[in-house]
Amino acid sequence: MNAAEMTAKIADGKGFIAALDQSGGSTPKALKGYGIDESAYDGDEAMFALIHEMRSRIISSPAFTGDKVIGAILFERTMDGQVAGKTAPQALIDKGVVPFLKIDKGLEAEANGVQLMKPIPGLDTLLARAKGLGVFGTKERSVIALANKDGIAAIVAQQFEVADQVIAAGLMPILEPEINIKSPERGSADLILRDEILSALDDDANGPKVMLKLSIPEVPGTFDALVEHPRVLRVVALSGGFARAEACAELAKNRGMIASFSRALLEDLRHGMSDSAFDAALGEAIDEIYTASTQKSLASV
């Protein structure tokens, strides 16, 4: 796939984006869910080797193809690693899956009800390396806890500032201002975030396209205006802590939004499974998430 083919697949393809980008802070939890306790490894290098083995197993599975998984988000170490004797981005491309890279380096302490991204040192160098490996786009995460307009405005401003740097490097940015689904002000935060993003998009009405990765809104259809905006290539949804069945049910109520799930995709996979059992469990998860991404319920109409 060349860049134009990747753009077309992400814009119009039927399916979802797999989030295989757990980083240092979330990797122990991901490994524990996979059946590997912290006592089974010693130090970060051993930990990252194990999570890379898990991701390689997923990407190499016959259940994981571009027919239903149109994209995948990688952690930097995964991008730099090998899958079946190829670079991870090339292994994805060969399966018809568009590669993305997680670029954020964690979160600042909460202020004004939000957590901004920490600085990203060496970003230009990282973006150039990613592009050289065939990566199509990036993802950057910050977190919203409360419906604080000043805080959410700061989140959106920072997201677009980093996105501009990504675009200048020739890559497609996924902005991810995640709203905590357990927030007591979730619905209000959804509305403020939607309006702040719309304002930022409209400030440069003829500007380049971006992608959005958002928490599934409390009220279905809240993000319809973002789905329809001419500057938005695609709106994808994070599972945000919902189990897969609930995440899929909620996603199906929102037209135009497709999944970009991590935990909800991986929740039934275990290290000790035979290859056939692993592939079957992954295939069932992919089918369920694909259906929620492509077949919308009456609640969304």
Image: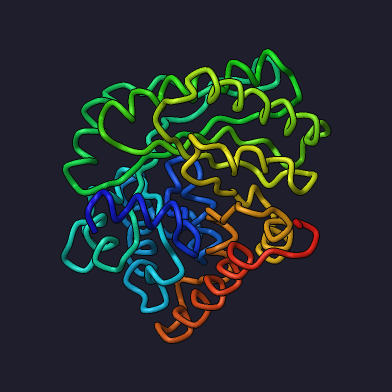
Image coordinates for residue 16, horizontal then vertical, percent:
50, 60
Is residue 43 visible to the viewer in this orientation of the structure?
A: no
Quick check: 235 above or below 12?
above
Q: Quadrant of residue 138?
A: top left
The quarter of the image holding the N terminus is bottom left
Q: Residue furthest bottom?
A: 276
Image coordinates for residue 31, horizontal then vertical, percent:
48, 58
Is residue 125 visible to the viewer in this orientation of the structure?
A: yes
- Side of 58 relative to 297 (left or right): left
Residue found 79% across the figure and 64% down from its top: 298
In depth, the one of 228 and 79 nearer the eye is 228
- Side of 194 relative to 123 (left or right): right
In depth, the one of 285 and 274 nearer the eye is 285
The quarter of the image holding the C terminus is bottom right
Image coordinates for residue 36, horizontal then vertical, percent:
48, 63
Image coordinates for residue 178, horizontal then vertical, percent:
61, 36
In depth, the one of 56 and 206 nearer the eye is 206
Residue found 42% across the figure and 26% down from its top: 207
- Side of 122 relative to 163 (left or right): left
Q: Residue furthest right?
A: 184
